[in-house]
Image (cartoon, rainbow, N blue to C red):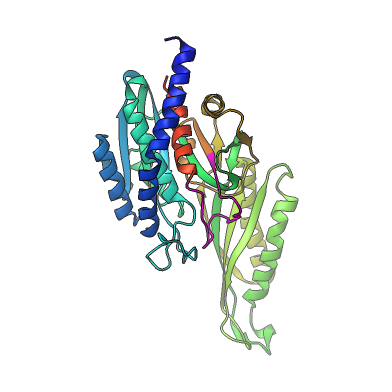
Amino acid sequence: MNDAARVNDATRHLHSAATALAPRLIEIRRDIHAHPELAFEEVRTSGIVAAELARMGIPHRTGVGRTGVLGFIEGGRPGPTLAIRADMDALPIHEETGLPYASRTDGKMHACGHDIHTVTLLGVAEVLKEMAPRLAGRIALVFQPAEETLEGADAMIADGALEGVDLALGFHNHPHQPVGSFAYVRGACLAAADRFDLIIRGKSGHAAHPYAAVDPIVAAAHFVTQAQTVVSREVKPLHPAVVTIGQSTGGTTYNIIPERVHLKGSVRTLHPEARDIAEAALRRLADGIAAGMRIEATMDYQRKVPPLVNDDRVLNPAIAALTDQFGDILIESEPSMGSEDFSAFATKVPALQLGIGSGAPGRHDALHNANYQPDEGCIPLGVEALSRIALDLLK
């Protein structure tokens, strides 16, 4: 059999294998959807994953990064190790879809499609286990907890999930793209996520006598408005950045100037330079307001995850593989200011984050929405796509 015939044979086999797995994967997905678990609580979900891997005869470890699962598929020939990662955690949202398999746990929901991701990787595991003799290398199946809190990737890496790994492949369902399409971004595709807590302390007093007090609310108001000049006047216009104050708490009633105000803020940047500038500027702003308004400002600035940067060493072969498998259905997208802790993998090995279209006809639900209903047709297509990329990277 010549090379072209082998490629065509693999293409047909992947499609039929993924299609055949779809009913079972959808059944498992609906079970996981009905029993959502939050970050580091994915005990039932990881148990399902482990049981499925055991059924397939795939060696695996549980309890990796607390509630993660790590499986391995050995190829027929030596070569690099490719990690394929799926996240498993749900969100603290009350589901309102009314679906027969809607969440049975009040206040918890798979509103970001991580149930889809989990079963998609299970499908990839089954396909690649069968086709292991074709692989020149090893597959690491990474079922990760706690993506929503941006903690699970670091926890799994600390527990050895990237030991011996040479390349990494992540993916996420995209509800604003139709099923059957795939999206990618060259370079930085998702933003760094940082956050800060700013405690502003003044001196409490009667509202009728502000001269005898030191008003932290006025100081906080200055910080909130001036923080926006960090983006417009300090960061380069071509380096996207977002500063958002998400919470402000302080005071008890109408006629009392409070002792303190607590601000919580989020900072998103795509470039390392912008990330450094934003942190330095916000710290300087807090110190300046403290000096000018006689208050005490204490900032706790936390760098959570770096930008997620796609590496051409994974991206280019993936584009070629998907084009050969599906035809001209790839969409080159713009970067997003959202964040994803798969970036922890991408800072250590060449990596790609792939978008898998999950938009259902007639629906326009966003991620993290109580009515989110992705089209389950994205599951077998995701299995087919990720399996094909893996086969081409380890050929």
At horizontal 71% and vertical 62% (from top left) the residue drawn is: 226
At horizontal 52% and vertical 57% (from top left) the residue drawn is: 372
Q: Main secondary structure of the magenta part?
A: loop
The answer to whether residue 366 is magenta is yes
**Which of the 4 quarters of the picture holds residue 177?**
top right
At horizontal 38% and vertical 65% (from top left) the residue drawn is: 105
Quarter occupied by the C terminus: top left
Q: Is residue 162 above or below residue 223?
A: above
One can see residue 79 in this view:
no
At which x and y percent is residue 47? 28, 49
Q: Is residue 32 above or below residue 169?
A: below
**Which of the 4 quarters of the picture holds residue 59?**
top left
Along the viewing direction, whichever of 112 and 119 lies nearer the viewer: 119
At which x and y percent is residue 323? 57, 26
At which x and y percent is residue 260? 56, 75
The answer to whether residue 312 is magenta is no
At which x and y percent is residue 248? 59, 70
One can see residue 352 in this view:
yes
At horizontal 34% and vertical 34% (from top left) the residue drawn is: 126
Magenta residues, start to end: 355-376
**Which of the 4 quarters of the picture holds residue 332?**
top right
Quarter occupied by the N terminus: top left
Q: Is residue 233 left or right of residue 378?
A: right
Along the viewing direction, whichever of 325 and 255 lies nearer the viewer: 325
Along the viewing direction, whichever of 88 and 313 lies nearer the viewer: 88
